[in-house]
């Protein structure tokens, strides 16, 4: 933060860039998940591997039930009060939520593929205690393989390793299998992609959208190496082209900050945000 | 060429690939697959944290036991079977001559 301070950029932290489109005046417009709007003549996408999203189990039609009984996060535990809830998973988040929700919900079932749990020992013990006292219905050596209900989720199908398949009525199914990086909303911005990475021209790391650049792990080109050094290099070259877009007609002069300092940066040209 | 072994990797379209694997470079199976441009992501860089290098071991080679980290990851991965391993945790060494593995389905 100290390093970037002299340049006095604007920050928009803890938000996810959701959409990128052309502002009526020709500049680019980015809207975040909190509804903040940023308008700028040039955009650099440095999204790395994307954003971390929940790992979705390969259950047929699971998308159809998202928000209709299938939840990958516990946003508000109140939502589950008095309901029947099935949690799947054997890690810390599955255990923690099973323990927490066991006392809030009408019925809590924890389904895990194995008998052993790999969460923190303390959590495993707490969960086992709740299972012994009947607060948690524990189904091990089993997997949730199907979801049923004409509109909302009504039942799940469980396949047990030795006892075969059975249905279980439930109001909610929470598959808690951790997070995985996904390109996320960036995939829908009309950028040319190759295997989940943004294709760029190595002259200036520009994308197929004029004024939009992609640098760092998120881009791809022949010979690409995912290294911090390469990301910095790409940023430097992209800035040369971005300068011309931001300052049309102005001459770009190359300087060493070690020689001349960063004079002129006291009043930086910060792109308009609102 | 005593420091090279042959490994067969069966891809997700059931196509076998014969890979020449150097055993003197400290490589693991995930890195080898990536160097042959097989569809293995190796997102976490080999820390047993993403399961994108999940494979099924098809030959009878004695492999070192999986670590707790690997078991924990396999626990929350999908399409896991008895012979599931993470490629990134399998160091290429000469005892693995003739190893045959299959790439597990990609999870979304
Ligand atoms: C295990 C491991 C070891 C490594 N070791 C080295 C090493 O020794 N040397 C080296 O040079 N490199 C190393 N690397 C690679 C290095 O970490 C990456 O090259 C570098 O971090 C990439 O930087 P980045 O800014 O492009 O992406 P990241 O550092 O991944 O940052 C991307 C950021 O963008 C955010 N983001 C994504 N989508 C959105 C969105 N829609 N809205 C808002 N924010 C978003 C993400 O949350 C993230 O914070 C290693 C990588 C790994 C995994």
Image (cartoon, coloured by chain):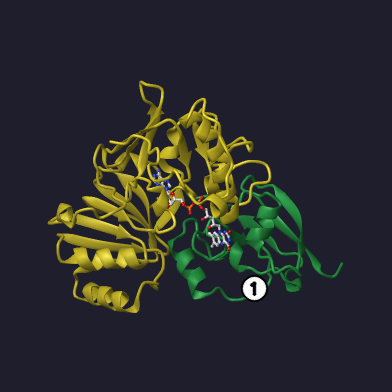
Chain colours: A yellow, B green
* Residue A164 location, quadrant: bottom left
Residue A130 is situated, as x and y percent measured from the top left of the image, at 22, 73
Residue A140 is situated, as x and y percent measured from the top left of the image, at 36, 67
**Residue at horizontal 54 percent and vertical 48 percent from the top:** A216
Q: Is residue A108 left or right of residue B82?
A: left
Q: Nearer the viewer, residue A41 or A182?
A: A41
* Residue B8 location, quadrant: bottom right
Q: Which type of secondary structure does the marked residue at label 1 adopt?
A: loop
Q: Quadrant of the C terminus of chain A?
A: top left
Q: Which residue is mark 1?
A: B63
Mark 1: C-beta under 8 Å from nearest atom of ligand 1: no
Q: Nearer the viewer, residue A100 or A105?
A: A100
**Residue at horizontal 16 percent and vertical 52 percent from the top:** A79
Q: Residue furthest right?
A: B1
Residue A253 is situated, as x and y percent measured from the top left of the image, at 57, 38
**Residue at horizontal 49 percent and vertical 71 percent from the top:** B69
Q: How many marks?
A: 1
**Residue at horizontal 28 percent and vertical 38 percent from the top:** A36
Q: Rate crowding at label 1 as few (under 14), some (14 to 19) or many (20 or more) other CA atoms within 10 Å.
A: few
Q: Quadrant of the N terminus of chain A?
A: bottom left
Question: The numbered mark 1 sits on a residue in which chain?
Answer: B
Residue A57 seen by the camera: no
Q: Nearer the viewer, residue A204 or A76?
A: A204
Residue A55 is situated, as x and y percent measured from the top left of the image, at 41, 53
Reply above or below: B54 against A154: below
Reply above or below: B19 against A249: below
């Amino acid at each position: 933060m100290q390093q970037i301070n002299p340049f006095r950029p604007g920050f928009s932290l803890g938000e996810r860039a959701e959409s990128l489109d052309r502002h009526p005046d020709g500049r680019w417009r980015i809207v975040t998940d909190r509804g903040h709007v940023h308008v700028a003549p040039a955009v650099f996408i440095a999204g790395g591997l994307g954003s971390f999203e929940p790992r979705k189990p390969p259950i047929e039609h699971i998308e159809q039930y998202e928000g209709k009984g299938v939840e990958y996060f516990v946003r508000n535990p109140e939502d589950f009060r008095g309901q029947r809830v099935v949690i799947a998973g054997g890690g810390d988040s599955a255990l923690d939520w099973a323990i927490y929700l066991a006392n809030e919900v009408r019925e809590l079932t924890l389904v895990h593929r194995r008998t052993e749990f790999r969460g923190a020992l303390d959590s495993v013990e707490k969960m086992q205690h709740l299972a012994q006292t009947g607060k948690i219905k524990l189904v091990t050596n089993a997997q949730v393989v199907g979801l049923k209900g004409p509109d909302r989720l009504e039942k799940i199908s469980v396949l047990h390793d030795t006892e075969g398949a059975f249905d279980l009525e439930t109001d909610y199914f929470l598959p808690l299998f951790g997070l995985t990086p996904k390109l996320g909303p960036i995939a829908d911005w009309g950028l040319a992609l190759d295997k989940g990475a943004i294709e760029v021209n190595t002259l200036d790391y520009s994308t197929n959208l004029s004024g939009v650049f992609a640098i760092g792990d998120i881009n791809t080109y022949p010979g690409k190496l995912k290294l911090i050094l390469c990301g910095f290099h790409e940023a430097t070259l992209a800035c040369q082209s971005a300068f011309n877009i931001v300052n049309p007609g102005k001459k770009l002069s190359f300087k060493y900050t070690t020689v001349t300092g960063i004079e002129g940066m006291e009043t930086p040209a910060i792109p308009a945000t609102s | 060429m005593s420091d090279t072994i042959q490994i067969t990797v069966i891809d997700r379209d059931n196509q076998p690939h014969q890979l020449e694997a150097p055993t003197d470079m400290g490589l693991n199976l995930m890195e080898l697959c990536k160097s042959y441009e097989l569809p293995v992501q190796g997102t976490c860089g080999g820390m047993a944290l993403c399961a994108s290098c999940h494979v099924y071991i098809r030959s009878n080679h004695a492999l070192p036991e999986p670590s707790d980290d690997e078991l924990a990851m396999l626990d929350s991965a999908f399409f896991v079977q008895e012979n599931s391993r993470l490629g990134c945790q399998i160091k290429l060494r000469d005892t693995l001559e003739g190893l045959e593995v299959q790439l597990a389905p990609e999870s979304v």
